[in-house]
Structure formats: structure tokens, C-alpha cells
Amino acid sequence: MSWKLAGVFIVVVAILFITACQSDESLEFKRYYSSGALVYQNHCQNCHGGNGEGLSALIPPLSDSTYLKKNIGSLPCYIKNGLKGQITIKGKIFEDVMPANDLSSVEIAQVLTYIGNSFGNKLNTIDEQSVQKDLASCR
Amino acid sequence: MRTTLILGLAIILLWSACKFGSDKKTLPIYGNRAPVTKTVDGKQVTDTIYQTIPPFKFVNQYGDSISNKTLNGNIYVVDFFFTTCPSICPIMHRNMLRVYETFKSTGNFKIISHTIDPKHDSVPVLKKYADKLGITGNMWWFLRGRKEDIYTIAEKNYLVAVKQDSSAAGGYIHAGYFVLIDKQKRIRGSYDGTDPKQVDQLIDDIKTLQAEPDQMIVQ
């Protein structure tokens, strides 16, 4: 029994050490990511789905990493002002309107970090400063 | 001691009663009902008249007229939406697609989605929406008609609230219910179309309704 207890103790200490050793960068990522998950649920999930799967040919999926990387500087504008016109996602054409979402720049950074690191995507943390910079040059 | 025993017995009885009941499940019949007394073979017989969906006439995504008669002999599910709806419609139709896929190969079953924005949602717009959703054939119809007719049937007959409201996202507020109608045009269930669990229940209930014996269908 006491051995078991000691085992649990060691594991707990080990977890504490590991979390303590995390860099500021990864802590920031985690904060952005977990807040972003909530923003996603409230503002994106109805249309884009819980797994970013989209809806048939009406709403594009969010799992096209190539598209996300290529358009990373425009994504904040797309969220803030909506998106019209044709886009090609995973080889399929989508042409319906995405409505504007009046989110703050930090919320946009959070949700982009969440999307950019979910559904099979692997992007870096997208922070508030870069979002603000991108928003300033929206067309 | 004795009270505990009696209590325990009561619980067991209640539990087994519930279990027995679930073996032969029938769906409730919703809406107003009225008794009628008529004379059959010189005897007074009391019967129940249930609330049913009254005659209607709409047009589907192919431009065909669809009336209450077109749906005779069908079990059907009803919802209300509009193609430019940014809020609950995508999630409703993501869930309705599951219903469509489940019953795709069975006869006597239809899905009808009424647009509550007939001004924008013309027949070609509805056809395009259906195409993009991946709907073919005649199991799932997207209907449009006169706005008053759509709003009246939604609220009075299918008991789903819809309203034009410029302050709401997309310009309309409406409830995301899926309403289940039996072959005699009576309401047998109402489900939140945005909740996958309730849609699972709808799929089960459609199967229950399909298994309902024919003598219950003859009124």
C-alpha cells in the first residue's frame, strides 16, 4: 500500500516538474489554444462542424493546411469581414458567403491558433500582434 | 423494517412496470383532440378526432407542385430553414443528412424543408442548395410558397415558431425543430434538430412508426 502511495507521489512530482519546465512559448500556445476552442464553439462550429468537417459543398472544411498556410495573412480579415467569391479548398470549389464575425483581435488570434492546430493542421501560435498587423491591411 | 420492505417492493414493481412498457413502444399523438360520437349498426360509438395537418400547396426544388395529397401514405419529417441562414440551419441540415442517409433506400418516407425566406429562396436557389448538400431524387424536398402560408402552417399546424426579425442574424428567428408526421398526418414527435442525440431519437422513432401495424393506420 505504501509503495503504491509512493508511486503516486513520484508521478505527481514528475508531472509538476514537467509542467514547470514548459517554456513560456508553449504556455502561451496552450492559453491561445484553449481559449480558441471556446471561440470556435461559439462562432464557427455551427457551420464548420465540431471536427472542422464543413458541410458538403456548401461550407468548406477547415482541414486544408496548404490553403491555411498560403493565406495566413488574410485569415484575420476573412474572419472579421466575412468572405465572398470562389475559393478552392481540398480541390473543391466553394462559392457561398461567409458572414462577418465581429471578434476582437485577441479572439481572432485564439481561434486561428485553435484551427491552425486542430483537424490535422500544424501551424505555429498566431499571436495578437500579428493579427493586428494583418487587420490593419485588410482590403 | 417493514416500511423499508414495502418501499423496496414498490420500487421493484415500478421498475418492472417501466421495463414492461418499453417492450412495445408506441409514439404519443400530439395536438388537440376531440371526441365524436357516431352511430354504427344502431350503437353509439365514441371515437377520437386528432389534430392533423390541413391541405397545403407548395413548390419543390424541381419546380413541381407538392400538396398534402402528394404526401399521402408517407411518414415525413418537417423543418423550417433558409438558404442564407448563418446560425442554426447548417447544423440542422448536417443532422438531417444523417436521417436522409439512414432512410435513403426505404419507400414511403419523405423529408420536407420549408424555406421561410421565399423572396430570396427561388426554385433555382433551392435546387442549387440541394445539389450542394448532395441531395438527389425525391426523398428530400425543399419547398417554397406564399410567405403567409409557410408561416401559418409552421406555427398553427407543425407548432414551430418562425418570425422575421431584422435584429437577428440573417434576418429571421426560428426554432430548429424536426417534426415527425405519421401516415394519417398527425404529429408524433418533435426534436431539436441542432442536437445530435435528439436526432438519433428521431431516427429510432421513424423506425418505430414504420413498424406500426396497418390496422392502426386505418382511421
Image (cartoon, coloured by chain):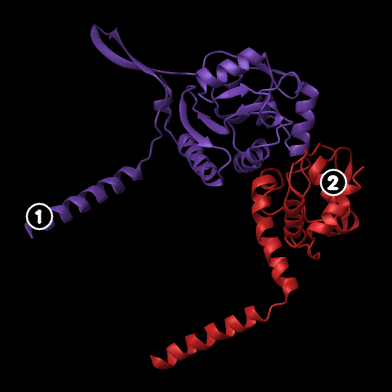
Chain colours: A red, B purple
Name which quarter of the figure residue B129 lies in. top right
Task: Rate crowding at label 2 as few (under 14), some (14 to 19) or many (20 or more) other CA atoms within 10 Å.
Answer: many
The mark lying in front, picked from 2 and 1, is 2
**Residue A128, horizontal then vertical, whole percent:** 79, 57
Number of numbered labels in the structure image: 2
Image point (56%, 46%), residue name: B196
**Residue A108, horizontal then vertical, whole percent:** 76, 51
Image point (45%, 38%), residue name: B208
Amino acid at circle 2: Cys
Identify the residue under disc 1.
Answer: B3
Which quarter of the rendering shows the C terminus of chain B?
Answer: top left
Image point (52%, 14%), residue name: B54
Front position in the image: B60 or A111: A111
Vertical position of residue A25 compared to residue B64: above or below: below
Front position in the image: B204 or B138: B204
Mark 2 element type: helix
Question: Residue lying farthest left?
Answer: B2
Name which quarter of the figure residue B105 lies in. top right
Image point (74%, 38%), residue name: B133
Relative horizontal placement of residue B212, taking residue B19 as reference (left or right): right
Relative horizontal placement of residue B110, taking residue B51 as reference (left or right): right
Front position in the image: B57 or A46: A46
Task: Rate crowding at label 1 as few (under 14), some (14 to 19) or many (20 or more) other CA atoms within 10 Å.
Answer: few
Amino acid at circle 1: Thr
**Residue B78 visible to an observer of this rendering:** yes
Identify the residue under disc 2.
Answer: A77
Which quarter of the rendering shows the N terminus of chain B?
Answer: bottom left
Query: Circle 2 marks a residue in which chain?
Result: A
Relative horizontal placement of residue B95, taking residue B16 as reference (left or right): right
Disc 2 from disc 1: Cα separation: 70 Å
Query: Circle 1 marks a residue in which chain?
Result: B
